[in-house]
Amino acid sequence: MRIAPLALAGIAAVAVPAIAQRAAPPAPVKVDPAVAKARDAALKDDVAYDIVEGLTTEVGQRLAATEAEARARAWAVVKLKALGFKNVHIETYMMPVWVRGEEKAEIVGPYPQKLVLAALGRSGATPPEGITAPVVYFPTFNDLLAAPDGSLTGKIAFVSNQMKAAQDGSGYGAYGAARFVGPNIAAKKGAAAIIIRSIGSDHGRWPHTGGTNWAPGVTPIPAAALSVADAEQLERIFTRTDKVTLHLTLTPRTLPDAESGNVIGEVPGTDPKAGTIVIGGHLDSWDLATGAIDDGAGVAITTAAAKWLLDGPRPRRTIRIVWFGAEEPGGFGGEAYAKAHATEKFALAAESDFGADNVWRFSTNFPDSAKAIGDRLGVALAPLGIVRSREVAGDGTDVGPLFKLGTAAVDLNQNGIRYFDWHHTPEDTLDKIDIEQMRQNVAAWTAMLWIVANAPEDWDRTTPKGG
Ligand code: ZN
Ligand code: ZN
């Protein structure tokens, strides 16, 4: 690849003088040699893979607040106790339950054929015999927004914006609106139903489910995601005619509120006044697959890292792992956790919920009294190929409610290039986990935990991201 001279000049103008102009070299950052030792030992970790392999094999799919998630909780308790964690217990809460029904789509005309789709979480239902209606094609989410009120009455909206893969996963936020709020908008414009192109970066025939959101007072309409291949097929048909009729059957149901729960275990610290570190991922999965990357990997990585500290010298701060019981249907686990523990002192919250590929970047959000921790993390994580981001940390559905309370944050960002090929599809299975990349995650989390748990600084609340 040829690099334009201008681009090289640009790099030099930014990077070199910034260092060269310093009056004195920066002081070296002191990191306990024990951190590097633990980090490098964790590169040989087997605990994380053992957890995700066991959970996906022995429990399978784990839709929140169903009997499957209850089995997952029981499995988690046994596993955490066997690993030696202390204070292992379940904290329960009640939540609504949405379950998938029949889901079928067939083009009636002009070219009769079946399409592959999956209902979105909280989708409304068609009658058992389905509906037959004309389809209105919107190439982008913005085109749906521009449709006049009432123009979709009796019709099925089809939104086909195409998500792109990106290392930081930014395509999900940018294109995900078609799923997060597209159905609500179509319902308000009178649509009988909505189908979207899956929010995914693959070209396969597996649909990507995921939750959608209804504003108060809006009656949910049937809402589903076509596989990317089927959405492209439908797009091709729309290049030939704008008169497409679809027969759609979706029969999901909302059941009475049921019990879900967060599973908790601890590495006890020596100084209760220093605040607790909360880390974890979500135990529940969508119902289409065994949730290896979303988010068996996250509970596995964070637990394996905590285990390296459990087996070492007792840390200053208590590390609490939380396997949140219900993230997918709307963050019920994280909300319940923050509500139940709102008055506790937390030193940090961090979650892993983006697969198991390498961590490539980190960011922090500490108050001024603890900002130097970020420099130590930078030194300890660099050998793993992890660079420091300028962004403010504080991402995650499960720990988000703790951030709102002012809890400090560290984000360890994983490479998201492959993640949305399989996210929320029947393809989210164990074979997508690369064990070496998962070990790099465990090493990164181990180093991070070691530094934060033993930090001599004291701090309380920080300013939440965006706050
Ligand atoms: Zn997740
Ligand atoms: Zn998910």
Image: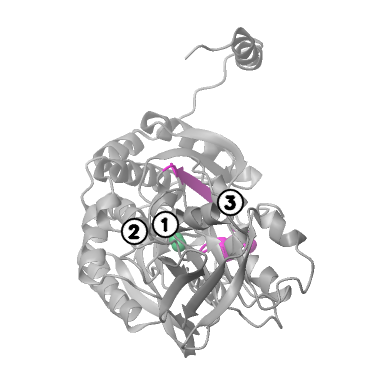
The amino acid beneath tag 2 is: Asp
Residues at marks 2 and 1 touching, judged by CB atoms closer than 8 Å: yes
SS class of the residue under badge 1? loop
Look at mark 3 in the image and give the residue it sits on: 239
The amino acid beneath tag 3 is: Thr
Camera-near label (2 vs 3) is: 3
The amino acid beneath tag 1 is: His
The residue carrying pointer 3 sits among few (fewer than 14), some (14 to 19) or many (20 or more) residues within 10 Å by Cα, namely few
SS class of the residue under badge 3? loop
User: In terms of image quarters, where does ligand 2 lie?
Assistant: bottom left
Q: Disc 2 and disc 3: Cα gap in Å?
A: 33 Å
Residue 110 at what x, y percent from top left?
Answer: 52, 65
Q: Is residue 270 above or below residue 189?
A: above
Mark nearer the N terminus (2 vs 1): 1
Mark nearer the N terminus (1 vs 3): 3
Residue 373 at what x, y percent from top left?
Answer: 52, 40
Ligand 2 under 8 Å from disc 1 Cβ: yes
Work out whether residue 377 can be spotted.
Answer: yes
Residue drawn at x 54%, y 54% is 235
Residue drawn at x 63%, y 78% is 192
State the mark number for residue 409.
Answer: none
State the mark number for residue 428.
Answer: 2
